[in-house]
Amino acid sequence: MTKALVWGAALVILLGAAVLAGGASQPSSVAQRALAPRDPELARCQGLGEAGSQDARCRAAWALARKRFFGGAAS
């Protein structure tokens, strides 16, 4: 019984250390590129919030993004 507790405690400590060590790693440059916005104009519009719906450039960018995504005419 005592031997099982010692092994269990050691396992919990090792798993905790592994989780903490994995969380401290920096994201790779590939992951950072994947998080970068593909369309800087859409990123700008997202930053505008509600005001983006009144911006002509944002409406055009969203229409183009819909056309690319759906593959047809934007409605």
Image: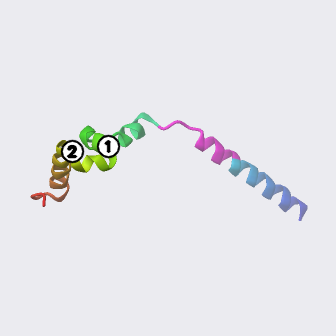
Per the image, the residue denoted by label 1 is 48
Position above or below: 27 against 62: above
Quarter of the image with the N terminus is bottom right
Q: Residue furthest bottom?
A: 1
- Asked whether, in this view, residue 10 is left or right of residue 66, the answer is right
Main SS of the magenta part reads helix
Q: Position of residue 8 (x, y in %)?
A: 79, 58
Q: Residue at x 28, y 47 (%)?
A: 51
The residue nearer to you, when weighing 54 against 20, is: 54
Position above or below: 33 against 61: above
Q: Residue furthest top?
A: 29
Q: Quadrant of residue 17?
A: top right
Residue interval drawn in magenta: 17-27
Q: Residue at x 33, y 47 (%)?
A: 49
Q: Residue furthest left?
A: 73
- Asked whether, in this view, residue 2 is left or right of residue 45, the answer is right
Q: Residue at x 84, y 62 (%)?
A: 4
Q: Position of residue 64 (x, y in %)?
A: 15, 49
- Asked whether, in this view, residue 47 is left or right of residue 64, the answer is right
Q: Secondary structure under badge 1? A: helix
Counting residues from the start of the chain, the first of labels 1 and 2 encountered is 1
Q: Residue at x 16, y 52 (%)?
A: 63
Q: Secondary structure under badge 2? A: loop
Which mark identifies residue 55?
2
